[in-house]
Image (cartoon, grey):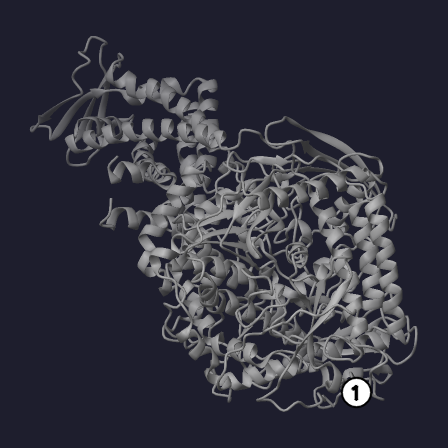
Amino acid sequence: MSWLTKTLSSSIGKKILMAITGLFLCTFLIIHLVGNLQLFKSDSGYAFNTYTVFMTSNPLIKTVSYVLYASILFHAFWGLYLEYLNRKSRPIGYVVQKNQSSFASRKMAVLGTILLVYIAVHLGDFWAEYKFGHLPYVKYTENLTSGEITAVEHLPDTYQQQVKIVETYNEESGSKSVIVKNLYAEAEEAFSNPLLVLFYVLSMAVMGFHLSHGFQSGFQSLGLNHPKYNPFIQKVGLWIFAILIPIGFAIIPVYFLIK
Amino acid sequence: MAESTIKLDAKIPEGLLAEKWTKYRSTMPLVNPANKRNLEIIVVGTGLAGASAAATLAELGYKVKAFCFQDSPRRAHSIAAQGGINAAKNYQNDGDSTYRLFYDTIKGGDYRSREANVYRLAEVSTDIIDQCVAQGVPFAREYGGMLSNRSFGGVQVQRTFYAAGQTGQQLLLGAYSALERQVGMGAVDMFSRHEMLEVVMIDGKARGIIARNLITGELERHFGHAVVLASGGYGNVFYLSTNAMGSNVTAAWKATKHGAAFANPCFTQIHPTCIPVSGDHQSKLTLMSESLRNDGRIWVPLKKDDSRKAVDIPEEERDYYLERRYPAFGNLVPRDVASRAAKERCDAGFGVGHSKMAVYLDFAASFERYGHLEANKNNLHGLIQEEILDLGRAVVKEKYGNLFDMYKQITGEDPYQMPMRIYPAVHYTMGGLWVDYNLMTNVPGLYACGEANFSDHGANRLGASALMQGLADGYFVLPYTIGAYLSGEIRTKSIPTDHEAFVEAENAVKNRINKLLQIKGKQSPESFHKRLGKIMWDKCGMARNEAGLKEAISEIRALKDEFWTDVRVMGDVEEFNPELDKAGRVADFIELGELMCIDALNRNESCGGHFREEYQTEEGEALRDDANYIYVAAWTQKEDGSWQLNKEPLNYENIKIAQRSYK
Amino acid sequence: MSEGNMNITLKVWRQKNSKSQGNLETYDVKGISEDMSFLEMFDVLNEKLIVEDKEPIAFDHDCREGICGMCSMYINGRPHGPLEGVTTCQLHMRSFKDGDTIVVEPWRAQAFPVVKDLVTDRSAFDRVIAAGGFVSVNTGNAQDANAIPIPKTEADKAFAAAACIGCGACVASCKNASAMLFVSAKISQLALLPQGDPERQTRAINMVNQMDAEGFGNCTNTGACAVECPKEISLENIARMNREYLSASFTSSED
């Protein structure tokens, strides 16, 4: 074995891999949420739909997204493998156990598994729909001077799905027409189902718990524990990653449901 | 006692006191490295002395086998030492020197120890600190990064190095890590959960041991060119002591069965500040470090059977008896003196607590003193009394917090709010296997070091000197002196353990174990131990007298007979069986108890920890008899089981003997 | 010999040896005084069992003053019982109520097999120390003790880590039976002191490798170990060990 495989397959190396992938996923969450906040713009999904195009076609972002998929899969299955190993370390359990650790820290594998299911559903709802499914197209006409969306035209269902975006400029009227796949409409439709909304909201609660331990745990695994900075890391982990971000995500389906 | 006594040659080198060790060390025969690899040494016990000896011998190249009964060598009872370790470093520039440490130790031991041994101890004390620091022992330090020192009873310099109240732990973990390093390199074979049950003698020399694997119950034969016993003290003969539950005399006792002399068995140290007994269930006593007497005042009520709470007894109705009797030293008199004074007050009916066998150790005055100092230092004015006391409590907490917590845990009382109740308890045994200057017993090839031998503390040990002696023996004395013996053994090949001496020894052990199991009586080993402890404490404890000792001897003999006819040992041979281990140890304690009483009866004087009521001054102080008893009483067992007294006279060539006074 | 008025029902794990199956047995212990230590209550029970011609319960104990690290009972779901910063031997019956039922189990970990009843084999810890928990300095090698000044704060931190008593409560409490608090305490002690510097890298790597070989679980930073540690060893040590191990792995010139 090379020194690197030896290092990464040691108990410390194993958790380092969890920490690195986990913290990477945390940064993704911020970007994802910021992007998703465009759903709240009252522009009939113009900003969101064009943003979607950008995110799925920019080569750099595409590369990063492959790293992201890999990270999700690695983090999930490596975590489950570690859980399996850890359970083997105590073949006979206790009859009575009063744990002094937080609920979330003990149940990371369960929480993570729920999240994996959630991610699969979520990707199926949107990512797969966008990539392989049949989405309607929408045409936005934007006044280039005022930035106002002047017309929204839902196009017939006959558009080719390979095309993500068609932009045309009309210099005379000083406007731009954009034809894109209408993922926004997909969201509207999906989140009209109260059961799905409930599933999303609960999943975000699960994510909150997962991150309430996961974020600061990642720092500890990387050896970043210092009395001066620890309170800050813990606050960011709790308030931003365990509370604000999950709420931010959870509001979206609720918003569409009650809109 | 008509039989001829054995000759006890201490083998003290010639020459000036200060040069003996250096000269001797430079001229003793050596073993070359190639031969060391073929020489095997057995070390029994892994406390400070045993672990340091085993590690050092392995570093030198010998093949070492180390044994301990605990599940890990790190748990030997040295770990529980609190206060510190002495060394004549003179880092405090307060006039300390090798000679001063030597002198203090001899005087503290009430002039009953060997000059040459004690001088050597003082000499190597400085090397110990260097070695421990190099190992990474985290001693307390000053802000400048230099080592910190504190003072202990019986001396006027600051020479005690410490690591909070856990010095023994840190030193032992240092020695243990050195030992484990050798284990990791394969130079030491470590046998934990093994108990040595017999010495194997071949042609008059110690050549191995029989040990019981405490997990499987199997008896194992181990050969060694030499055997080192570092098995600790025998304070548990009193049942209640500050020793660990497992501390026992068995290894040393087996040596006496092969002619090894047991020296000064009656010299036991009773520590004045321990948490008192709370009931019959009590299994052990806990020490409150001597350092507490720096800040605590000891008192009892002036009135007999005063049942008021301590805080309700006004100042003028309290008797600060140490300050009253010993104005010069006050609460900081040596251990033996403080212990006897507490016993005197309690016996006279002035004791406190529900048992009436305790005195108060009161920190109220210190809370107030430190509180005012803190208030002044921080420019706080107009504080109410309770606020000042709180400031003082914080200072005391920083110094002794862990001890206060321990006290609260055990008694359920908060010593920050009310005085501690304390009472003397058995703590250390100065007596042990007789050894010469080389730490070899009178059995060739059989060595004893640390508390297991008798060598350095005379009739009373000074605080913070036990750690010093254990490590001195193990790191810096035995590894040299054993080489001189082994240099004569380089032609001795390893003796196979099917040698008849091993077979016989194993059979002897087997028979004894079977005998214990087959008695199938009614009483548990524990109950015998308790009864022995009570006899010893009542009649051979803090104060002894002729009549009591004679009674004790006959009671112990009767107890021995009862033990061997009515003990109940549960469980089987071939399994993990703590009851069997205990039974064997108690059987040895019973025999030792008798010898201690015989020794105490023989010594018609009071000195150090040995206080014979018949021999005291008018003020109740110990009265030594230097004309008749300035010798080491080394006892050997005769064929019929009775004990032969052998005397090693003590010659004081460098120190003028004087009466100890603390008034 | 009843001295008090507490009656306790004990459920204790009984197991003949490492090869046999064990189970919880129920015992009534009467007349317990609240001043008794938890182990003294076991003494009382064992004496009673002997009188009834039953085999006493085997449990590890030695110093009974909280420093040797031998005692190791998992009491009502927590190592060393309900109090924090306290070993089993320092736990007293006043922490319980008359009529309580107390479940007592041995440490549970693959790396700590049960020897008998409540006694486990913790020799894995010794092997971890033997792998690198030392400074390689032969007797006689040392320079003067004051030759290297060590800042008080660093010495204090090293001491706090060195206060570990090796009882194994960290392993017992960890849901993964991980030994990282124990191992990190020793690595930290020596990493904080200049004496430990020459072997800093090999120590971290060798000790972690040995820890893994012993079959302890991985750390998932739940923090239970630090809560249950009777000597209150800090989680900071585990982070330090992670750093030490990583920097050693990535920068040492050895493979």
Give the image location of residue B118, x and y in percent.
56, 78
> Which one is in front, B356 or A241?
B356
Label 1 sits on a secondary structure element that is helix
Which residue appears at 24% of the width and 50% of the height?
Answer: C251
> Which one is in front, B628 or B50?
B628
Which corner quadrant of the image does residue B443 belong to? Answer: bottom right
Residue lying farthest top? A158
Q: Which residue is mark 1?
A: B325
The relative height of residue A119 versus residue A41 in the rendered view (above or below) is above
Q: Is residue C89 left or right of residue B623?
A: left
Amino acid on which disc 1 is placed: Arg
Q: Residues within 10 Å of mark 1 (few under 14, many from 20)?
A: some
Which corner quadrant of the image does residue B62 belong to? Answer: bottom left
The relative height of residue C146 versus residue C213 in the rendered view (above or below) is below
Quadrant, the N terminus of chain B: bottom right
Which residue appears at 49% of the width and 47% of the height?
Answer: B495
Quadrant, the C terminus of chain B: bottom right
